[in-house]
Structure formats: C-alpha cells, structure tokens
Image: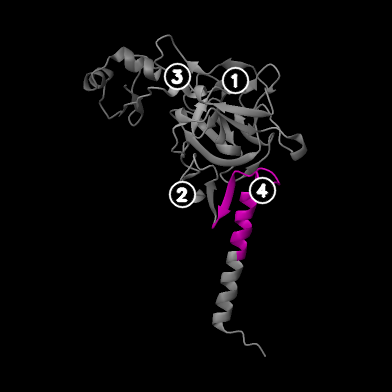
C-alpha cells in the first residue's frame, strides 16, 4: 500500500506548478503562428530570447521590463545588414494586415518645421473620439501605459523579427500586456490624450526599438502593405545619423522660461519650438521640458 506522506504531497504540488508553468510558457511562445520553426521567440523557463544573434545578445524576462519600456533593444540600427526580409502577410496561416483605423492620413513621418526642431516619428490618422482602433498585425501586447505629456494612453504590440507597432493618444485601452492578438483585434478606442491637438491615432512602426517611416511599407491608397514580405533597409534610419541625446529640464515650483533658458544657455524661443508651447504659458510643476 502506498503511503501518502507530507513529502510526497509537497513533491506532487511542485510537479503540478512546473506543469502549469510550462503550459503558460508554451501558450505565450506560440503566439505568432502554428509553425514554431519560424517563430522568432522561444521560451526557456518563461524567458523570451530573440534568435537572431546580431540583434539581441542577452536574455530578458517578460515580467521585468516588457510592459514598462518602449524601447527594450540595445542594437544600433544604423549598422544593419543591407536588407532584412520579414514576411508579414500569409493568408494561409492567418497572417494579414489591418489598417488600425480607416480615417485619412493627417500628418506624415519627418520634421515638423523647416528648422527641424521637432521630428514626428510616426503617421497620424484621423478619427473620432471613441472609434475602435485595431491591431495591425498578429502579435503580443507588450506595453500599455499612459504618458500624459506625450503619447497619452498607448499600446505597443510585438510582431515578427523585432518589428513592433505603437498606437498613441487612445481614449481607452482594451488590452493588457501579455495578451495575444490577431490582426483586426480591437485594442483601444480613439481619442486625444497626451500631447495632442485633436482626436487622431498616432501610429508607429518600429524595428529593434527605432521608428521608421510607415509609408516605406504601407500604402494609404490601398490601406494595405505594399508587399507581403517587407525588406528592412539601413537607409530607413538615416534620421538617426548624428543624433544627440536630448537634454531635459524638470520644471520646479517658481521656474520661468527665462531662468531655464539662461541655465542651459539657450533661448526661450528655442524651448518653445522644441516643446510646442507658447512663451506666455504657465509651466506645470513636474513636467519635463526639452531644452536641447
């Protein structure tokens, strides 16, 4: 007769926990498609590691950072190989592209003014507050946050081969980090949260954490990708050449634009241009102003 001892009971519980953990990892592992040989991520003790050696050389834990930071990669995209192909559309496998909202493009990628003092790292698509915003491609939700001085409520979704999409200025977020989504899954409601002049969707494509012009691969005329397989190119990141880390000042009580400009050896006009504010605006304590 088998005696059910406390030690045996403890061992049974441990085995059950391990089994559940493996199932949980497997579910997250296979979120792109049913062909695990082409899945760019693999799981090992619930850790996600990018398979391409020249992309990521360290192992991260999903719970540590992926639902907090926008750019988790440490790779210089200006040193990419000549071309990196990524197949995004394969209808036989249920892989398609869906334009997040059906509105018109209202602003493109690139400098916002002739001086180049501000740069727009995505495309803006017109919508009405409350319009449903959809996932563009199959993937897994990595970040959902509220950046009240920038993107507002936003979502970042990870796709294949280091490709990600970002959806900004949402009125409401409908998904959570770790959630598997398909192209066309509702992820939020459109709005004008954060640093926004009116209702619209700020939409970004990112490769290894860095933005590139969505219109390199997306046609607003056809509302689809230009080709089922995209080819990431080094020149798409030329806007990063010579990029210098920006300098910010956190506004303290009693700060004035004149004092801040003097402190950083710049001008009030330059600070206003960098932050798209007026010289007579009251400064909110705690916000970060770009000064250089």
- Marks 2/1: CA–CA distance: 33 Å
Residue at left offset 65%, top offset 87%: 2
Mark 1 highlights which residue?
Answer: 215
Q: Please tell me which residue lies in front, 49 or 277.
A: 49
The image shows residue 279, relative to residue 158, as above or below, that is above
| Residue 138 image position (x, y, % from top left) | 66, 38
- Highlighted magenta segment, given as a residue range: 19-45
Mark nearer the N terminus (3 vs 1): 3
Mark nearer the N terminus (2 vs 1): 2
Left or right of 237 in this view: 89: right
- Marks 2/3: CA–CA distance: 30 Å
Mark nearer the N terminus (2 vs 3): 2
Asked whether the residues under the numbered discs 4 and 2 touch, taking CB atoms below 8 Å apart as contact, a structural biologist would say no
Q: Nearer the viewer, mark 1 or mark 4?
A: 4
289 falls in the magenta region: no
| Residue 140 image position (x, y, % from top left) | 60, 42
The image shows residue 119, relative to residue 27, as above or below, that is above
Q: Please tell me which residue lies in front, 51 or 122.
A: 51
Mark 2 highlights which residue?
Answer: 64
Residue at left offset 52%, top offset 23%: 236
Quadrant in which the N terminus is drawn? bottom right
Q: Residues within 10 Å of mark 1 (few under 14, many from 20)?
A: some
Could you say whether the residue bearing mark 2 is in a helix, strand or loop? helix
Left or right of 212 in this view: 185: right
Could you say whether the residue bearing mark 3 is in a helix, strand or loop? strand
Q: Nearer the viewer, mark 2 or mark 1?
A: 1
Residue 119: mark: 3
Mark 4 highlights which residue?
Answer: 36
């Amino acid at each position: 007769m088998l005696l059910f001892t406390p030690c045996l009971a403890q061992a049974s519980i441990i085995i059950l926990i391990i089994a559940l953990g493996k199932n949980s990892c497997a579910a997250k592992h296979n979120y792109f498609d049913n062909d695990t040989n082409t899945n760019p991520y693999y799981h090992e003790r619930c850790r996600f590691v990018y398979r391409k050696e020249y992309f990521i050389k360290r192992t991260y834990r999903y719970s540590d950072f992926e639902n907090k930071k926008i750019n988790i990669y440490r790779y210089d995209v200006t040193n990419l190989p000549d071309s990196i192909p990524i197949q995004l559309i394969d209808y036989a496998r249920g892989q398609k592209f869906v334009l997040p909202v059906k509105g018109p493009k209202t602003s493109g990628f690139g400098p916002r003014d002739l001086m180049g003092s501000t740069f727009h790292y995505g495309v803006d698509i017109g919508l009405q507050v409350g319009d449903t915003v959809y996932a563009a491609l199959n993937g897994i939700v990595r970040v959902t946050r509220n950046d009240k001085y920038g993107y507002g409520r936003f979502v970042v979704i990870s796709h294949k081969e280091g490709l990600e999409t970002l959806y900004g200025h949402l009125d409401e977020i409908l998904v959570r980090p770790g959630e598997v989504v398909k192209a066309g899954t509702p992820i939020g409601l459109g709005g004008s949260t954060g640093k926004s002049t009116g209702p619209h969707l700020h939409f970004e494509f990112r490769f290894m954490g860095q933005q590139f012009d969505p219109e390199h691969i997306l046609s607003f005329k056809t509302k689809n990708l230009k080709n089922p397989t995209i080819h990431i190119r080094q020149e798409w990141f030329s806007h990063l050449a010579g990029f210098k880390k920006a300098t910010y000042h956190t506004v303290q009580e009693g700060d004035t634009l004149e004092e801040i400009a003097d402190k950083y050896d710049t001008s009030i006009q330059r600070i206003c241009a960098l932050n798209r504010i007026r010289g007579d605006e009251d400064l909110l304590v705690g916000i970060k102003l770009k000064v250089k």
